[in-house]
Every structure is written in structure tokens, then in C-alpha cells.
Image: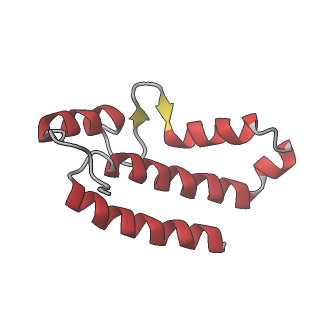
Amino acid sequence: SSYTSPPPYPGAVPRSFLRNLMAPDGRDSVICGHSTMNAMIDDSMKAYMLPALALERPEALTLAKGVAKLALEYFVTLCYNLGRQRRRLAHCMEEWGQMQAH
């Protein structure tokens, strides 16, 4: 079985357009004109109905910031060619492992 998309492969121009649409300014930019990744993670944590005291702890803020960084990096990675995706995903998996260790 093949883990790649069937031909024709997505071209460089559509992938670049998608990457610029998702994260035009890099790490802490507005995602698709909606909100920042940090705000999306914070909203998700609130929607999960975590207690307000837990959300205000420094550990929760650090976790949300780290997850937002990794999630944005993951989504941007999907906009690269297959070779670069594999290399970046291997790096992302190491960082996710470090986040879970804390």
C-alpha cells in the first residue's frame, strides 16, 4: 500500500497559497482571517468545560501556548512537498513527545 496521494500530486503554487492563507506572518499570525492559533486552543480548552481556576494556572497557559505552536507547525507542514513533510513530521513528533513529558 502507498502512503502518498495518488497522481497528480498537488503543485507547489496551490501548496504555497494554502500556507500563506493559513499563516501569512509566521508563528503567531491570524489563521485564515479568523483568529490566532493561541485563541483557537484557548477556546477549545474552554469549550471542553475545564474549570476556570485550572485555565488560569501558569501551567495551563504554558501548555496552551506550546500546543498552539505545535498545531500551527503541523498544519503548515502539510503544505510542503512529501519529502519535506516527512522530515518536519519527524521533528514535530519529537516536540509532541517533549510536550507530553511535562
83 horizontally vs 92: left or right: left
Residue 52 rendering spot, x and y as whole percentages: 84, 42
Q: Residue at x 35, y 35 (%)?
A: 22
Question: What colour scheme does the image use?
Answer: secondary structure
Q: Is residue 89 above or below residue 46?
A: below
Count every numbered label the image shows and give the total. 0
Q: Quick one: 57 or 48, which is closer to the camera? A: 48
Q: Residue at x 31, y 41 (%)?
A: 25
Q: Which quarter of the rendering shows the N terminus?
A: bottom left
Residue 17 rendering spot, x and y as whole percentages: 21, 33
Q: Which quarter of the rendering shows the C terminus?
A: bottom right
101 horizontally vs 34: left or right: right
Quarter of image, res 33: top left
Q: Is residue 20 above or below residue 62?
A: above
Q: Residue at x 22, y 43 (%)?
A: 6
Q: Residue furthest front?
A: 1
Q: Is residue 93 above or below residue 56?
A: below
61 horizontally vs 77: left or right: right
Residue 59 rendering spot, x and y as whole percentages: 72, 61
55 horizontally vs 92: left or right: right
Q: Quick one: 9 or 13, which is closer to the camera? A: 9
Q: Residue at x 39, y 46 (%)?
A: 75
